[in-house]
């Protein structure tokens, strides 16, 4: 029987957990994304409000501003989603449940692949990344029961 997986995440770190029926939860993998904790000034590769011109009539355009920190959050969401997608395609789990802080949950859900979406048991806008493993099992069981 394939295990159930749970991904606990926020924009800076995540834990992938596995639970076989009747057994305690175990941590399969931990992920860290230190760049998400960096200051925007450390992440920006470009001057704010910089314009580009292609030399033609009406060629001046302003690129829409995308916060450098948000780009890092999206990068981390894609990293997590890609890893889980590979595991889903390999059939490593029966189902996966996501617990993530808001708005990171939206970025993570947007990055999920087709195989992961098929096995997705549920999503919960709740940041449990600071909770210890013993308490985590209890909290997850409580949240899944409601």
Image: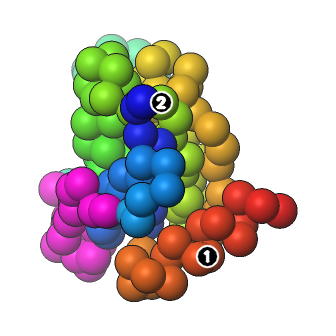
Which residue shows up at 49% across the image and 56% down it?
22
Q: Is residue 89 visible?
A: yes
Residue 94, labelled with which disc? 2
What residue is shown with label 1? 139
Q: Position of residue 24 (x, y in %)?
A: 41, 65
Quarter holding the N terminus is top left
SS for dot 2: loop
Q: Position of residue 145 (x, y in %)?
A: 77, 61
Tell me, what colour scheme is on the image?
rainbow
Q: How many marks?
A: 2
Residue 27: in magenta span:
yes
Residue 41, labelled with which disc? none
Other residues around mark 1 within 10 Å, as few (<14) / some (14–19) / many (≥20): some
Quarter holding the C terminus is bottom right
> What are the residue bounds of the magenta stretch?
26-45
Which of disc 1 and disc 2 is earlier in sequence? 2
* Quarter of the rendering containing residue 49: bottom left
> Is residue 14 left or right of 95 when viewed as pictured?
left
* Quarter of the rendering containing residue 126: bottom right
Which residue shows up at 55% across the image and 59% down it?
99
* Quarter of the rendering containing residue 42: bottom left
Q: Nearer the viewer, residue 67 or 37?
A: 37
> Is residue 101 left or right of 26 when viewed as pictured?
right
């Amino acid at each position: 029987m394939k295990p159930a997986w749970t991904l606990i995440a926020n924009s800076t770190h995540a834990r992938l957990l596995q639970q076989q029926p009747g057994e305690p939860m175990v941590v399969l993998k931990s992920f860290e994304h230190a760049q998400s904790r960096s200051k925007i000034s450390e992440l920006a590769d470009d001057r704010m409000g910089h314009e580009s011109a292609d030399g033609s009539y009406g060629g001046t355009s302003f690129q829409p501003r995308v916060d450098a920190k948000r780009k890092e959050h999206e990068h981390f969401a894609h990293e997590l989603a890609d890893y889980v997608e590979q595991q889903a395609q390999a059939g490593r789990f029966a189902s996966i449940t996501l617990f993530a802080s808001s708005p990171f949950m939206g970025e993570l859900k947007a990055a999920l692949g087709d195989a992961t979406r098929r096995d997705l048991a549920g999503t919960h806008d709740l940041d449990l990344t600071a909770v210890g493993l013993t308490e985590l099992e209890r909290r997850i069981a409580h949240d899944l029961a409601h």
